[in-house]
Structure formats: structure tokens, C-alpha cells
Image (tube, rainbow, N blue to C red):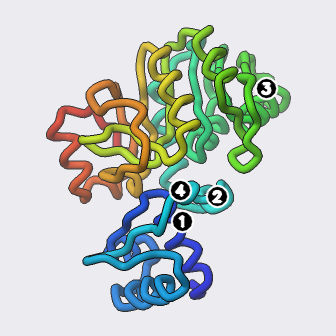
């Protein structure tokens, strides 16, 4: 991996979690701890971050990593999570999907079920499901919520979106957070994303959190649902070795490992 690409990945981690350890950087980038330390030192010199004991913290509030960066993060794990999440659904259910890379992959897997009503704030998810309906003769009912368009995330947010969510009752809400831990529950970086996820969770009979291993034991700026109010967590097998996974299990969380 080129140095410039490592810098992009490190900045992505920082903007998502605000604080990362040297070990986390080394593991996620597949480099030595010494290389990770040098990269953090160089980024500190550039004014991107501030080094602290054991890692680094972001300087000032920054947005979540761009969608294009998140789409390249752990794609195989997200695909396995999507396939496992599919097994928790039944035909003819009503489903909330928020905007996220894992929920977007899940949308691609929904063609194996029939008669779903899918309510989403994600333009890309709605388009994927519409294409599935056309190509595979699926009979899903796809509802794209209204609201203010956010070009970067290809989704809608705001008061109109929240108001429309409260018009529906769903069997299941499948949500993709930035982080998930025992203390803070499911969290995201942006307030407007949390408002949508929070509204969806309150309007659903069951809440399923889709979180790959990089999100387990992590927390971001804003919490939208407490750990105790989450019915099921779907993650990948690499999460099993993480302290955050053990903490969730000990707290009684129902976890499906893909």
C-alpha cells in the first residue's frame, strides 16, 4: 500500500472514530507498528491529527469518511453480514433501511425474498431495489422518503424525513452505525444521520444493527439507540477476538456472527 493511500485510510479512521490506537492503524492497514507510528508522526506534522499516548486523535470536528472511502472498507465482511441479516427477514415484512454501505449491500441481497415493503432514506438503496424489481421481476414495494438531499451520502435527511418515518410502522429496522459499544450503544458521527436512525428504531418492532468488526467496541459522536434496545447485532467473525465483542456478549446482546 502506497504511503498516500495509507494516509487516506488513517484519516478515514480518525474522522469516523475521532481516536485510534497505533495497534488499530497497523492492523487495519496491514503494516508494522513502526510504519503506523511513522505515518502518524507525518500526519501530525501536516496538522491532520494530534498524537497521544498509544495513538492519535483528530483535530477538531470533521465529517465522517467519504462514502467512496467507506465503500472500499471491509467489503467481503459486509457482504457476509448482509447475507446473514437476510436470514432474519421473512417475505411480506415492512423494513426500514438507513443509509450506509452495509445496508446498501443488503439491498442487493433482498431479491431472494418476496413482497417486502422497504422504506429508506437512501437514494442509492431505492435505485438498487428498483433495478432488482425490473431485472428479476421481484415484487418489493419500495418507498423513498422525502427530505433534504445530501449529495455525498446519496440520502435525504431533515424534518421532512423524520415526519415521514413516523407515518410508518415496520417489522424490522436494519441500521448501519459508525460504532457500537456497550456504554453508548449504536452511534454515528453526524446528527442528521442519527435522527433518521433513531426515528426508524422507534417505529420498528425489532432493531437489527449491522456492524462489521471495525465498528465493534467503537463509539462516535452521537448515540441513537442504547445497547439494551437493540434486538440483534450482526457482525463478522473477525469481531470475536475484540474486547468490545466480549463486552457485548457479557451484557446479554444477541449476536449473529457471519
Q: Secondary structure at mark 2?
A: loop
Horizontal relation, residue 120 to residue 32: left or right: right
Farthest residue to the right: give it.
Answer: 134
The residue under the point 58% across, 39% down is 103
Q: Which residue is mark 4?
A: 76
Q: Which residue is mark 1?
A: 12
The residue under the point 62% across, 56% down is 71
The residue under the point 52% across, 49% down is 78
Residues under labels 4 and 3: Cα distance?
24 Å
10 Å crowding of disc 4: few (<14), some (14-19), many (20+) = few
Residues under labels 1 and 4: Cα distance?
19 Å
Q: How many marks?
A: 4
Q: Earlier in the sequence, mark 4 or mark 2?
A: 2
Tell me residue 22's x, y (percent).
Answer: 34, 77
Q: Secondary structure at mark 1?
A: helix
Q: Secondary structure at mark 4?
A: helix
Q: Earlier in the sequence, mark 1 or mark 3?
A: 1
Horizontal relation, residue 183 to residue 221: left or right: left
Q: Earlier in the sequence, mark 2 or mark 3?
A: 2
Residue 222 occupies quadrant: top left
Q: Secondary structure at mark 3?
A: helix
Tell me residue 254's x, y (percent).
Answer: 27, 32
Q: Which residue is mark 3?
A: 133
Q: Earlier in the sequence, mark 1 or mark 4?
A: 1
Horizontal relation, residue 161 to residue 244: left or right: right
Residues under labels 2 and 3: Cα distance?
29 Å
Q: Earlier in the sequence, mark 4 or mark 3?
A: 4
Residues under labels 4 and 2: Cα distance?
19 Å
Amino acid at each position: 500500500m502506497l504511503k498516500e493511500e495509507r494516509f487516506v485510510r488513517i484519516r478515514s479512521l480518525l474522522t469516523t472514530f475521532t481516536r485510534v490506537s497505533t495497534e488499530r492503524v497497523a492492523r487495519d492497514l496491514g503494516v508494522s507498528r513502526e510504519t503506523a507510528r511513522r505515518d502518524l508522526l507525518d500526519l501530525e506534522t501536516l496538522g491532520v491529527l494530534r498524537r497521544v499516548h498509544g495513538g492519535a486523535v483528530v483535530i477538531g470536528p470533521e465529517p465522517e469518511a467519504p462514502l467512496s472511502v467507506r465503500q472500499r472498507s471491509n467489503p467481503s465482511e459486509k457482504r457476509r453480514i448482509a447475507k446473514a441479516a437476510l436470514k432474519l427477514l421473512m417475505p411480506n415484512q415492512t423494513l426500514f433501511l438507513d443509509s450506509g454501505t452495509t445496508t446498501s449491500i443488503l439491498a442487493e441481497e433482498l431479491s431472494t425474498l418476496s413482497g417486502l415493503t422497504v422504506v429508506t432514506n437512501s437514494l442509492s438503496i431505492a435505485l438498487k431495489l428498483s433495478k432488482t424489481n425490473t431485472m428479476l421481476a421481484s415484487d418489493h414495494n419500495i418507498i423513498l422518503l422525502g427530505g433534504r438531499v445530501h449529495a455525498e451520502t446519496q440520502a435525504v435527511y431533515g424534518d421532512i424525513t423524520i415526519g415521514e418515518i413516523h407515518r410508518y410502522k415496520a417489522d424490522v429496522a436494519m441500521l448501519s452505525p459508525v460504532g457500537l459499544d456497550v456504554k453508548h450503544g449504536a452511534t454515528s458521527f453526524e446528527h442528521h444521520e442519527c435522527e433518521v436512525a433513531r426515528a426508524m428504531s422507534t417505529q420498528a418492532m425489532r432493531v437489527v444493527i449491522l456492524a462489521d468488526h471495525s465498528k465493534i467496541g467503537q463509539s462516535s459522536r452521537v448515540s441513537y439507540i442504547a445497547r439494551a434496545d437493540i434486538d440483534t447485532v450482526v457482525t463478522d467473525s473477525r469481531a470475536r477476538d475484540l474486547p468490545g465483542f466480549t463486552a457485548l456478549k457479557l451484557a446479554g446482546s444477541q449476536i449473529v456472527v457471519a
